[in-house]
Image (cartoon, rainbow, N blue to C red):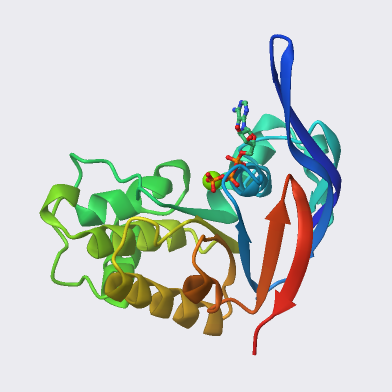
Amino acid sequence: MLDLKSISRVFSNGDESVTALEDLSLTIHKNEFVAFMGSSGSGKSTLMNILGCLDRPNQGEYFIDNRNVAELDDAELSHIRNKHIGFIFQTFHLLPKLDAISNIKLPLRYSTTSEQEGHQTALELLERVGLGHRIHHKPFEMSGGQRQRVAIARALINQPSVILADEPTGNLDSKTSLEIMNLLNELHQQGQTIVMVTHEDEIAHHAQRVIHMKDGKILKEEVNR
Ligand SMILES: Nc1ncnc2c1ncn2[C@@H]1O[C@H](COP(=O)(O)OP(=O)(O)OP(=O)(O)O)[C@@H](O)[C@H]1O
Ligand SMILES: [Mg+2]
């Protein structure tokens, strides 16, 4: 489903250049749960940004469902970002002034879903992430774990083909992290494709496949279970 072919990403500012990804090839199949690990600066977030079509490689090709991302125009790209990819971040990225349900409905602004249908779906998602009783709470009125649940519900609202989660438990204590991982596991069991970055072995252990990165390359892969 996601296919990277000899991807390189070099950042250059002035006369300095940093190779964040180097000749990296990778296939992620539908319904896989993949975790990326590796030291700080090894290129994990850069890779996630490319997978999420937020950034482009300097070299190599990226295919989503056999479509070459480089050949998509802006409209097609934003359609893919909005409809096919759900993002979850370490710092949640919720809008502070909006309550839980309004945050979840945000990605619907660019869709043709009716307000009523969108509202219903958002309510169902809030239930599904265990926050049916926090519909009108704003981010500052919720715990970290609850905020991440809202962010997960928001990532799910357009029924994305893949969820990209960059250190989803990076700001959470271990008990809350486990709750979030249980939720991601549940989504995976229901057929969701998940690609995650983490620094913690315990968190990575929830994935089927753990890919270790070093200096912008894949160092090794492990298969769990
Ligand atoms: N926009 C940018 N401009 C210049 N260099 C960048 C940019 N983004 C990333 N880099 C560099 O690319 C390398 C990989 O960065 P990346 O953010 O992908 O690492 P990471 O594996 O996610 O690290 P961490 O675990 O700390 O989040 C780093 O050396 C970083 O400094
Ligand atoms: Mg990172």
* Rendering coords of residue 218 (x, y %): 78, 57
* Residue at far top of view: 14
Numbered disc total: 0
Looking at the figure, which quarter contains the N terminus? Answer: bottom right
- Which residue is located at x 63 percent, y 61 percent? 36
Please give left or right for residue 131 compared with residue 162 in the image: left
Q: In this view, does 154 lie above or below 183?
A: above
Q: Is residue 28 visible?
A: no
Q: Which of 158 and 211 is in front in this view?
A: 211
- Name the residue nearer the viewer: 35 or 191: 35
Picture quarter with ligand 1: top right
The part of the image, by quadrant, that contains residue 168 is bottom left
Q: Would you identify the image quadrant in which residue 9 lies? A: top right
- Which quadrant holds the C terminus? bottom right
Give above or below for 91 relative to 73: below
Residue 32 in percent (x, y) is at 66, 74
Q: Which residue is painted at 48% across and 80% down in the image?
A: 185
Q: Which of 192 and 114 is in front in this view?
A: 192
Residue at 11% over, 53% down = 141
Whether residue 6 is visible: yes
> Where is residue 169 drawn, in percent x and y?
39, 62
Whether residue 148 sits left or right of residue 216 in the image: it is left
Q: In which quarter of the image is residue 59?
A: top right
Q: Which residue lies furthest to the bottom in this view?
A: 225
Q: In this view, does 206 lie above or below 36?
A: below
Q: Give the residue drawn at x 56%, y 46%.
A: 40
Out of 70 and 44, give the one closest to the viewer.
44
Q: Where is residue 71? Give x, y as percent.
A: 82, 36
- Is residue 90 toward the left or the right of residue 98 in the image? right
